Image (tube, grey):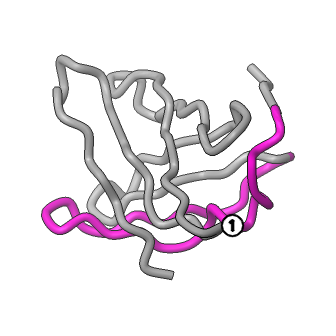
Amino acid sequence: MLLNLRPAMAINSYTGKYHHELYGNLEIIRGENNDLEARFEHHNRMFVKLQPLGGNRFFANFSDPIYGKTVFPFTVQGNKVTGVKIKVADFVETDPYIFKKIN
């Protein structure tokens, strides 16, 4: 599925390292087309393809289908990305993880 709707900010604004106090680090890099790819520090084989949904929301498709497909909303303050809310399938984990951008 190729959504490729225009994000609110330049695609590179969303790239970088993010941190969650308990879960660890997450890195978001530029992928193909206008996509992003998220990789988790403690899940070396897992990644998430992110496609723009418009605004600061991205459609998230986990490489491991057990985690599902969802939407990752990014938080923005003063034209700067400050974090991302990550949610997986409810039967895996009911609460979202809020990762803060560290660079």
Q: Secondary structure at mark 1?
A: helix
Q: Is residue 74 left or right of residue 6?
A: left
Which residue in the rendered view is the most extreme toward the bottom? 103
Neighbour tally class for label 1: few under 14, some 14-19, many 20 plus, Cα within 10 Å: some
The residue beneath circle 1 is 13
Residue 55 is inside the magenta segment: no
Q: Is residue 87 above or below residue 40?
A: above
Q: Is residue 50 above or below residue 76?
A: above
Residue at coordinates 44% horizontally, 71% vertically from top-left? 101
Q: Is residue 64 above or below residue 91?
A: below
Residue at coordinates 73% horizontally, 54% vertically from top-left? 31
Q: Where is residue 40? Give x, y as percent.
A: 38, 58
Residue at coordinates 74% horizontally, 48% vertically from top-left? 8
Question: What's the residue type where badge 1 is placed?
Answer: Ser
**Quadrant, the N terminus:** top right
Residue 14 is inside the magenta segment: yes
Total numbered circles: 1
Residue at coordinates 76% horizontally, 45% vertically from top-left? 7
Q: Where is residue 46? Give x, y as percent.
A: 41, 47
Magenta residues (range): 5-33
